[in-house]
Amino acid sequence: MTIRILVNPLAREVIEDEVPDRAPLLFHRRLPGYRESPLVDAPEIAGVMGVGKVWVKDESERLGLPAFKILGASWAIYRTLEERLPGGLGAWETIDELREKLEPLRPLSLVAATDGNHGRAVARVARLLGLGARIYVPEDMVAARREAIAREGAELVVVEGSYDEAVERSAEEAGERGLVVSDMSWPGYERIPAWVIEGYSTMLWEIEDELRRRGERGPDLVVAQVGVGAFAAAVVRHFRGARAPTGSPPRPKLLAVEPAGAACLLQSVAARRIVSVPGPHTSIMAGLNCGRPSLIAWPAVSRGIDVLVAVDDEPAREAMRLMALSGIVSGETGASGLGGLLELLRGGESPGHEEARRVLGVGPDSRVLIFSSEGATDPDGYRKVLSATG
């Protein structure tokens, strides 16, 4: 079993002066089909890990899609379209009213690169708003994820190469009739990825509000899976920002999980600068198969994550089966955070393992928050994993 561990020497208690607000949450509540995703109490998982409590934020259904990505995509698209219209979008109540306000911008296509969930989310928002969509995908994307994007009405462009090559191709589409919506950022392209990060905050506000309703204090440890780092940056901003989350210990520990073959954040933190991990990236954790961290996410994730681990595919498979026993449908990427934490907790007694566990402080009274970031986006693959004995 492959596991790489890095205790972050750059980690800080507070890394953001800016206080995230609830504007994305208020926006998402106006979209058709909005409802809070479940915060599942998972005692079976807690028992396996030997901790006091585990919550799983179950993102297997979000605004009609089987992943959380539409939260970031929709907010970033909305903010960008608002800027493109002279005088902004003004008041609106329904999606039909919003669609009508976009008439001066047509014809316009939304463009994205994806390993699956982000591109489908962009295509869904395009369909809701009456816009075109062109989605670039790496050649090794499984058929089920390609077909799901195509069903949203998007033009699908298959790129010979990895996700990173797909990002490069999509960036060439930027212009008056092409709006590139990426969760990856690079020099000169930072505002839209920053809005994507903001959009993910809806999940975190929902968790905070739900724990307050239950009268429970917040987590001691939060686990975030990492691709380019946009989602992890949202987690860092929420839990390591200047405002301490209501009902939480002041600063929970943060753990990042990546595939062993695409550990771009771990390697970048070790180098103390952004580095690239060349492909091919072949993990079943497809949404995390990214070779380079996002420029806009880097300041938060490089200083806000306490421990980084990279694991091979088997822990993700095991975590998928364990999630299913708790009634949670979690795909390969969705279960990866749990898989990485399990592998770290039960790993060997090397100095790296021991130091990481000491820094995280996980014990029998710990309260752990895990994100199941997607459902069964590859149904055939999901069934094969669950039918295996491990």
Image (cartoon, grey):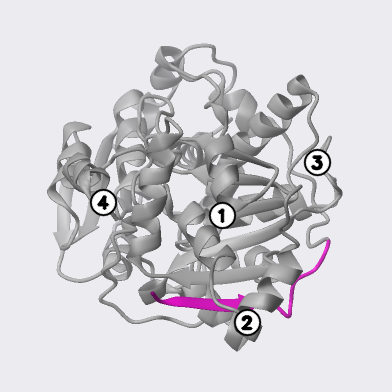
Q: Residue furthest bottom?
A: 271
- For the residue carrying disc 2, how many other residues have a C-alpha within 10 Å: few (<14), some (14-19), or many (20+)? some
Choose the circle earlier in sequence order: 4 or 1.
Answer: 1
Residue position marked by numbered label 2 in the rendering: 352
Residue position marked by numbered label 4 in the rendering: 389
Image: magenta residue range: 1-13
Distance from disc 2 to disc 4, alpha carbons, whole Å, reads: 30 Å
Name the disc covering residue 245, or none.
3
Element marked by disc 1 = strand
Q: Is residue 257 left or right of residue 149?
A: right
Distance from disc 3 to disc 1, alpha carbons, whole Å, reads: 17 Å
Residue 102 position by quadrant: top left
- For the residue carrying disc 4, how many other residues have a C-alpha within 10 Å: few (<14), some (14-19), or many (20+)? few
- For the residue carrying disc 3, how many other residues have a C-alpha within 10 Å: few (<14), some (14-19), or many (20+)? many
Q: Nearer the viewer, mark 1 or mark 2?
A: 2
Q: Amino acid at mark 3?
A: Pro
Please provide percent x and percent y for residue 59.
Answer: 46, 35
Distance from disc 4 to disc 3, alpha carbons, whole Å, reads: 40 Å
Choose the circle earlier in sequence order: 4 or 3.
Answer: 3
Does the stretch in magenta take in 70?
Answer: no
Choose the circle earlier in sequence order: 3 or 1.
Answer: 1
Whether 186 is drawn above or below 322: the answer is: below
Q: Amino acid at mark 2?
A: Gly
